[in-house]
């Protein structure tokens, strides 16, 4: 075995050796060889850990609970069963899923018995197309929602005052006029709130400030133009305010509009981001 | 295993349950029998699904991912070598598929790196180095360099967190840390060393 970087895939012979090493199926000589190799090869050490973890997943009830395995199992069963019976009726699959949910673990294999004798590997396309319909969804509202969204956009555009001087990066989208969120979705649940600067301000800001209503240990602050070009990005902030340094002050131009937002981290994990706010420097 | 079972054209579920993993795979590979494939699926569905969940962090995506893994398993059964271990073989397919899924979401790596507290953009001199770093940035180069400065377990934690995108909890389970704090410390140490590495001029000028 040659030494490898942790990112390269060891080839299958090495994996096979590692698998047999874990299972204790190697001769003493082979075991000694594997041990010696592991001592000098980070890639294989990592691979061994990964493989051991894979094998241990069967007993990991904690992760299974996190991953909602009990809820996912019927769906997965139905989809894999559909690989063999692409002609099966969709309703049958739903029934199968329901039954599978209640059936005993030991009897589950019976549900996988297909009606026909389709050989796996013959017609994957039909099965793949089908899988998207395993969970039926009402789709009549999509064109309606699209039409409504178009109406809102058109009405919104008509309300923009095109006579105003366009700030750097173009006209402010109407959604920004409130200083509110531009890209919605997950922002609605964020518990970080931007305080200042927001809206029209007389001079270049001295401080950026926000409020945190959930645990955090560091922040990333980003300032960008309405065209979403990043002007400034500051990482590893340990406070809920940021004093503007001269280097940033020189980047901000009067009579320009900027957007800014803050992303919060807690113990290495991102825990939320604020909605964007805008500010316009008048002088 | 019973040799009778292999001679039957359609082994019953009862017989299949008695098969060892590796014999079952040989049977499935030779006969392409659905019942044998279904038995393989039954034995590995939980592991494959949980494995996928570690990478996708989402139950719906993990179901999609696990289904694709099983498609590859059944499709690849023809190439299964007699004498190979089925568990290793399934693992290899699941791992390769999940990593290729990650590669397709290549933005992940970039985003994860951006969240590293490595170089302050506000500093004009560092800015140039950072841009140079980003231009030449590639997974292999980054890790080849990281390997030189980190201890073995730190590197493992670093790769699992920033490359595989695993949660800190999952890393602590994979690396067998006593508790979640142990894994977090490993990642923090690795990140600190990596930051120092990136800030060193010789790396940027490579």
Image: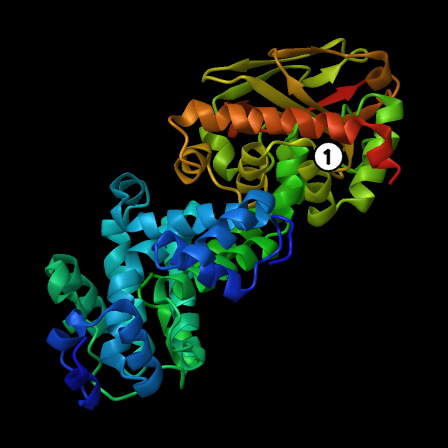
Classify A210 as above or below A75: above
- Quadrant holding the N terminus of chain B: bottom left
Q: Circle 1: is it few (<14), some (14-19), or many (20+) Cα within 10 Å?
A: some
* Residue at figure coordinates x 16%, y 66% from the top left: A108
| Residue A173 visible to the viewer | no
Q: Residue at x 11, y 58 (%)?
A: A102
Position of A267 relative to A58 (above/below):
above
Q: Mark 1 — on which chain does it sit? A: A
Q: Which residue is mark 1?
A: A172
Q: How is the image coloured?
A: rainbow
Judge left or right: residue A73 versus residue A98: right
Residue at image x 81%, y 38%? B133
Report the number of discs: 1
**SS category of the residue bearing label 1:** loop
Between residues A271 and A146, which one lies in front from this camera angle? A271
Tell whether B148 sits left or right of A272.
right
Please report the residue visible at 25 percent of the width from the left and 63 percent of the height from the top. B43
Quarter assignment of residue B26 = bottom left
Percent of width and height locating residue A69: 27, 50
Specify the farthest residue to the front.
A29
Residue A249: percent from the left, percent from the top?
84, 16
Residue B204: name its quadrant: top right
Residue A192 percent coordinates (x, y): 52, 20
Q: Above or below — where is A177 with respect to A30?
A: above
Quarter of the image for residue A18 reads bottom left
Residue B76 horizontal/vertical position (percent): 44, 76
The foreground one among A88 and B87 is B87
Q: Tell me: residue A193, above or below residue A164.
A: above
Q: Quadrant of the C terminus of chain B?
A: top right
Residue B65 shows in this picture? yes
């Amino acid at each position: 075995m040659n030494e490898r970087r942790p990112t390269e895939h060891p080839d299958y012979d090495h994996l096979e050796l590692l698998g047999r090493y874990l299972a204790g199926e190697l001769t003493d000589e082979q075991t000694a060889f594997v041990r010696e190799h592991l001592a000098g090869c980070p890639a294989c050490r990592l691979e061994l850990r990964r493989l051991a973890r894979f094998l241990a997943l069967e007993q990991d009830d904690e992760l299974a609970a996190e991953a909602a395995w009990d809820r996912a199992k019927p769906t997965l069963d139905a989809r894999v069963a559909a690989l063999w019976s692409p002609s099966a009726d969709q309703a049958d699959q739903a029934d199968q899923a329901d039954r599978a949910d209640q059936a005993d673990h030991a009897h589950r294999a019976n549900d996988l018995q297909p009606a026909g004798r389709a050989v796996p590997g013959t017609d994957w396309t039909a099965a793949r197309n089908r899988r998207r319909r395993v969970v039926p969804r009402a789709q009549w509202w999509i064109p309606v929602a699209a039409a409504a969204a178009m109406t809102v956009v058109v009405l919104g555009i008509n309300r923009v005052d095109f006579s105003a001087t366009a700030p750097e990066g173009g006209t402010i989208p109407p959604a920004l006029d409130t200083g509110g969120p531009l890209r919605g979705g997950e922002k609605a649940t964020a518990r970080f709130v931007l305080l200042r600067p927001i809206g029209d301000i007389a001079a270049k800001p001295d401080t950026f400030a926000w409020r945190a209503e959930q645990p955090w240990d560091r922040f990333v602050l980003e300032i960008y133009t309405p065209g979403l070009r990043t002007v400034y990005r500051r990482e590893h902030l340990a406070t809920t305010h940021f004093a503007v340094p001269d280097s940033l002050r020189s980047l901000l131009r009067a009579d320009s509009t900027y957007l800014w937002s803050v992303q919060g981290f807690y113990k290495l994990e991102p825990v939320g981001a604020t909605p964007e706010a805008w500010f316009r420097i008048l002088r | 295993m019973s040799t009778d079972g292999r001679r039957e054209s359609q082994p019953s579920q009862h017989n299949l349950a008695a098969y060892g993993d590796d014999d079952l795979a040989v049977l499935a590979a030779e006969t392409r029998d659905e019942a044998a494939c279904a038995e393989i699926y039954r034995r590995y569905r939980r592991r494959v699904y949980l494995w996928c969940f570690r990478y996708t962090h989402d139950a719906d995506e993990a179901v999609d991912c696990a289904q694709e893994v099983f498609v590859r398993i059944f499709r690849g059964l023809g190439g299964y070598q007699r004498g190979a271990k089925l568990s290793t073989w399934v693992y290899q397919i699941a791992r390769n598929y999940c990593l290729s899924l990650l590669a397709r979401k290549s933005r992940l790596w970039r985003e994860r790196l951006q969240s590293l507290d490595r170089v302050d953009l506000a500093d004009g001199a560092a800015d140039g180095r950072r841009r140079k770093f980003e231009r030449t940035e590639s997974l292999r180069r980054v890790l080849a360099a990281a390997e030189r400065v980190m201890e073995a377990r730190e590197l493992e934690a670093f790769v699992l967190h920033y490359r595989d995108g695993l949660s800190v909890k999952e890393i602590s389970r994979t690396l067998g840390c006593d508790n979640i704090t142990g894994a977090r410390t490993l990642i923090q140490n690795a990140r600190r060393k990596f930051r120092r590495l990136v800030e060193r001029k010789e790396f940027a000028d490579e």
